[in-house]
Amino acid sequence: MRGVRGRSVRTRAAVGVVAALLLAVSACGGGGGAAPGGGEVAEVGPDGVDDGATLTLWARDSLETQTNLLVDAYNATHQNKIEVTIVPNDDYVTKVGAAAGAGGLPDLFAADIVYVPNWAEQGLFQDLTANIDRLPFKDTLNEGHMSAGTLEGSSYVLPFVLDLSMLFWNKDLFREAGLDPEKAPATLEEFAAAAKAVQALGKPDTYGTATGLNCGGCLVFTWFPSVWAAGEQVMNPEGTESLLASSTATRVYDTWRDLWASGAVLPSSQDEAGPTWTAGFTSGQVGLMPYPATLLASAQETVDVGVAGIPGPGGGASTFVGGDGIGVSKDSTKAAQAWNFLAWLMTEDAQVEVLAKNNDVVSRSDLAANAYASADPRLVTINEVAAEGVTPVARNFQQAFNAPTGPWLTLVREAVLGPGTAVEQNNAEITAVLGQ
Amino acid sequence: MSVVVPTRPRATRSAPPAVPRRNGRRAALSGWLYATPTAVFVVALFVVPLGLVLVMSAARWPLLSGFRGWNFPDNYAKAVGNRFFVDSIVFTLKYTVLATVLLIGLGLGLALLVQESTRWKGLLRTAILVPSALGLASASLLFYVLYSPLAGPLSPLMADLGATFLGTPNAALWSTLFLIVWRYAGFYMLLMLVGLQGIPTEVYEAARMDGASRLQLFRHITLPLLRPTLALTTVLCVTGSLLAFEQFYILTKGGPDNSTISVVQLVYTVAFQGQNDLGVAAALSVLVLGVLVLVNVLQLRAFRRPDEGP
């Protein structure tokens, strides 16, 4: 008797476990499988709804300053209230992924623009096409961001904050090294010469340049522009084939290889995985380096900064139009209120009075020549270069370029620190990942 | 280095006590009631997640969109075919052997030392044990700063030597091992101390009277009688090392040049850094789980006393 009863209870328990499992599976599947909505947002007026709702917003810590400034300005002038969660850069994908699977995404969330094509395809954002089409200044919105956020004719994101990579130089160190502190190096070769000149000062703890040789994202952001400046591409238009073994790209690696060998690169650059890659310049230890333009405001607190586009081999200038796009998440039930924030974000109030005032680049080209920008010639430069910048689009961008174990990092490290003979082979490896 | 001790249902085959049936039924019911809280926890926190991982490993399950149909055994093929699969296993094994030898050796050595010394006993014990109070992630962050060639207090030293703590594969491995020894030596010392104190002094006295030397005492009394403790510590250490993640995630991020990717880090990378494929990550996890169960069974069997039987 005992044995039989025991077995039946066990069977029941097993059935329970299986049921719980199925429930968990179907819950996850259901949450993730929801098709991106869009009807609700489109039905409300062009400005959305401002009825005192509480909205949640996630952004990564690289854009913490801008996020807080924007949200504070919005909260001060609107009934709706936005609660911000800032997530460390490295944990952002993990957090969004977990929330997406569990149906717990916030109303609004920003995404690194290079991840947007993939995330939009996975259905994390609601379709905003109808609303965006109604914006009178639609054609002035940053082209790189808009095309990254457009999938098969539908638009999912608007530019949140643009982050451009620009060449920053320390004017004091330039002066000491006998270089013209008001004139930017016009070519990658001049860039290298300037770095070596600063290094030749022989000042303790002072180096010509710096980079993050163990940080795929930093290298993409700062080295791709040199290729674009020379009029070439890093990938095919579909983002499925890597062109990073071209002679131009090789010249970029060789320039850095030479700089590294001559000791003109901050030594910690070799292991720099990202967290402190900009610290050397801010503390006045670095002569010149490609740098995120969003940090201009904080860098100029300690350093007299000069700003220019990133030069390529033989000349030209370009920039990586990075930063974050922002959209309404698939899980938001307050899409109309969330659109109210997005519509406000694109107005002159937000673009000029918040972003431009903080020395940031505006997302609308018709506002590029604003009062704050024209007061500072560096901002004019940034805005001008922004128009020539590129936002690379590829579905597997993160895996190929940003991942710490990605093939791009292998290519750069081999080309700059290693023997430098396997560029072709490593480039093929990138293509293999992009094409998956 | 957290260890989930698998709870094994005890298969008692003892004859039911000769009591009236109603009593027996009531006893059984109360037995089930007593067992319910544990059972609920085991099911909710162990069986269900484990089941979910098994399901994931047999399904197409992208991080951002969830369940997308079955595809067994594709995930396992992809997991084994990952370009870092073999490297990460080799590295994890290397790390496990080094960490286990260092920690068990040092733990035992420190325990003997602390036990022998009388004057500084309290201070020594505290000093060695204090790092254990720090979480592994916090300890890793602390060492990240210590090892940083830019912000760390040791950066002048590194500049003089022309080398960095995390710059080469070997340096990164040993720097991480140093962190682990610093963090866990005290913990293993404590376990060893408890084991040492469980050995009756009479045995030592008797052996001494028979004229045994110090080395003989250690080899023929301490080591055999410490067997259960050694078994426990090796199982803990091997399991923990095979599951190493935080220290590498924070200190090296698998670098330099992908030389320090542990198996769990590979799982994390596949799940969250690029491929974003929970299915393949789950398949890797299942493989790791299988290996762990096997290793633990073998270890426990190897440490079993000969007279204990099967």
Image (cartoon, coloured by chain):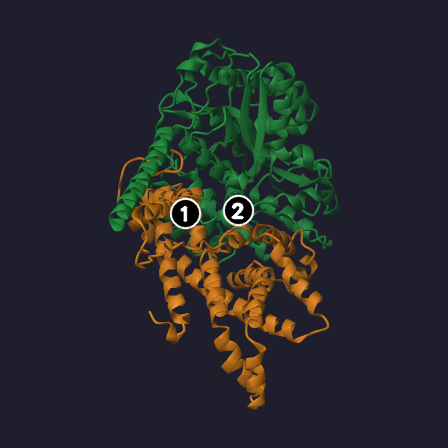
Q: CA distance from mark 2 to mark 1?
A: 51 Å
Q: Is residue B181 above or below residue A3?
A: below
Q: Amino acid at mark 2?
A: Cys
Q: Quadrant of residue A373?
A: top right
Chain painted green: A
* Residue assigned mark 1: B35
Horizontal and vertical percent position of residue B34: 42, 46
Front residue of A413/B158: it is: B158
Horizontal and vertical percent position of residue A384: 58, 26
Chain B painted colour: orange
At a point 39% along the width and 20% down the height, the residue shown is: A37
Label 2 packing within 10 angstroms: few (<14), some (14-19), many (20+): many
Q: Residue furthest top?
A: A45
Q: Is residue B11 visible?
A: yes
At a point 33% along the width and 69% down the height, the residue shown is: B310
B150 with respect to B68 (left or right): right
Front residue of A315/B101: it is: B101
Chain identity of mark 1: B
Report the number of numbered marks: 2
At a point 38% along the width and 45% down the height, the residue shown is: B32
Q: Is residue A357 above or below residue A303?
A: above
Which structural element holds mark 1? helix
Front residue of B70/A400: it is: B70
Q: Is residue A162 above or below residue A41?
A: below
Q: Residue furthest bottom?
A: B211
* Residue assigned mark 2: A215
Label 1 packing within 10 angstroms: few (<14), some (14-19), many (20+): few
At a point 59% along the width and 83% down the height, the residue shown is: B205
Q: Amino acid at mark 1?
A: Ala
B156 with respect to B258 (left or right): right
Q: Quadrant of residue A163?
A: top right
